[in-house]
Amino acid sequence: MYGRIVRIWLTIFPYVMFLEPEDIQLILNNAKHTQKVFFYKLLDNFLGKGLITRDIKSWRIHRRLLQPAFHLHVLEKFTNTFAKHADHLMNKILEKNNQEINITTFINDSVYNILSETVLGINRINRINEMDDLPFRKGQIMLLYRMIRPWLLIEWIYRLTKYGREEEKQRKNLFDTCFKMVKEKRDLLQSKDRISNNDIKKNKNISLLEYMVEINEKNPCFSDEDIVEECCTFMLAGQDSVGTATAMTIFLLANHPEWQNKCIEEIDEIFNGDTRFPTISDLKEMKCLEMCIKESLRLYPSVPIIGRTLGEDIKIGKHIIPAGCSVLISPYSTHHLPHHFPDPDTFKPERFNSENSEKRHPYAYIPFSAGPRNCIGYKFAMLEMKSIISAILRKCRLQSIPGKKEIRPKFRMTIRAQGGLWVKIIERDQILKSIAA
């Protein structure tokens, strides 16, 4: 594809890009290289300084404080929430039985509802107007627009443009809403028993917002503004990444019926006709579905580019890359290296069986980044994706649509599918009835 090291320019900014896993490991696995590059700063205007964009010192503090909320034994309590929203999604999809649908729209709605409940503690299933006035669906982050127009990187100039004014309006709406939620949640918690670390250990079902409000009570350095910024980060970053990955996997299963059949057989064996919601043990047993999700993320990693600033000199082959240099890592490019993934453009979930995974370099596959500054919510995301896809496959079969079998990736901060991801939904009971007839 390219050489081992590539020098590229993103508009007026020079970067060095690394493709090989052993070089990527030198960067991502070293705590001295955890500072993000310049373009992440552009997210501050909308997200504030959440885990994605924080400087090293405050990131370490926030990561340590938030990590307990993402331990697997805590996430187990969220599985019922995942299943409830996945079941609601499946019923909405069944209303489109025998029709062609853009699955992306349905998945994004479900992911948004899941995040609303798990992050903010808001159950949106029974809302009359699902697209209500909460601002999290309206985040228009103009990062790429500004990158290709360098004069707009000057903040006061950007603020004079209609995009700058709109971004500021959205940011104010977003932050005002979040500050109001923090106050309401604090008032509510003050009228109840305090959330303790024992609640976390006992898997009590609390939202991330509740957990952060309690952190604030015990750690004054974790301010209300910090809570708001982290809520915005989880809500906005979690929508695109998980929504796209889930929709991509469903689309690929529709286009590869042999793997869809394997997933359905696996799911049917786990539930054996029982209509109960899945437990975390059930989700762990979905090995075939997990391989399909991982292969989808290999082909189309939600975040196609990662940027870091080197904290010290590193040597790559005969080259010395100096401290302070801005470097890029492209999961998309690394995932398509043929010497690590033969026939890289083909959907082959068997790449992720235990035998093949053990043979592979650990940094050849990095859809959630890796090292100290990896994605804090990757376990959350995997459980969420399994819950949604398995709920659909328990009652539906997916068919590809002639003329709409190709994914046209659009590269932004996250990958999106240009033109949507279209599939045909067929109720499984309908198939059985037609066979019986």
Image (cartoon, grey):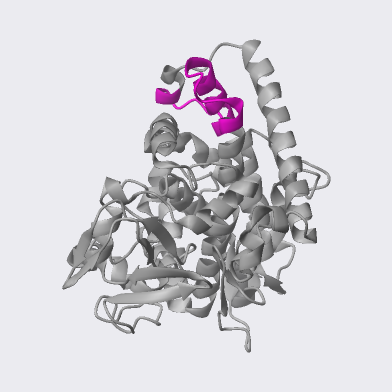
Whether residue 29 sits left or right of residue 258 in the image: it is left
- Displayed quadrant of residue 351: bottom left
Residue 60 visible in the current orientation: yes
Residue 393 location (% of width, % of height): 54, 62
Does the magenta segment cover residue 206?
yes
Residue 87 seen from this side: no
Which quadrant is home to the N terminus? bottom left
Residue 182 sits above or below residue 44 on the image: above
Q: Whole-percent x and y of residue 109?
A: 68, 54
Vertical side of 6 occupied by 288: above or below: above
Q: Position of residue 305 (x, y in %)?
A: 45, 65
Q: Residue at x 61, y 31 (%)?
A: 225
Say which of 121 and 353 sits in front. Answer: 121
Task: Left or right? Give the position of 355 relative to 264.
Answer: left
- Magenta span: 200-226
Residue 188, given in percent of the width and then of the height, sits at 67, 17
Identify the residue at the far bottom of this view. 403
Of residues 356 and 100, which is closer to you in this image? Answer: 356
Is 89 rendered above or below residue 124?
below
Q: 168 or 191, which lies in front?
A: 168
Is the C terminus in the top left, top right, bottom left or bottom right quadrant?
bottom right
Instruction: Determine the residue positioned at 63% across, 89% down.
Output: 403
Please say whether residue 9 is one of the residues in the magenta stretch: no
Judged from this view, the residue extending furthest toward the right is 128
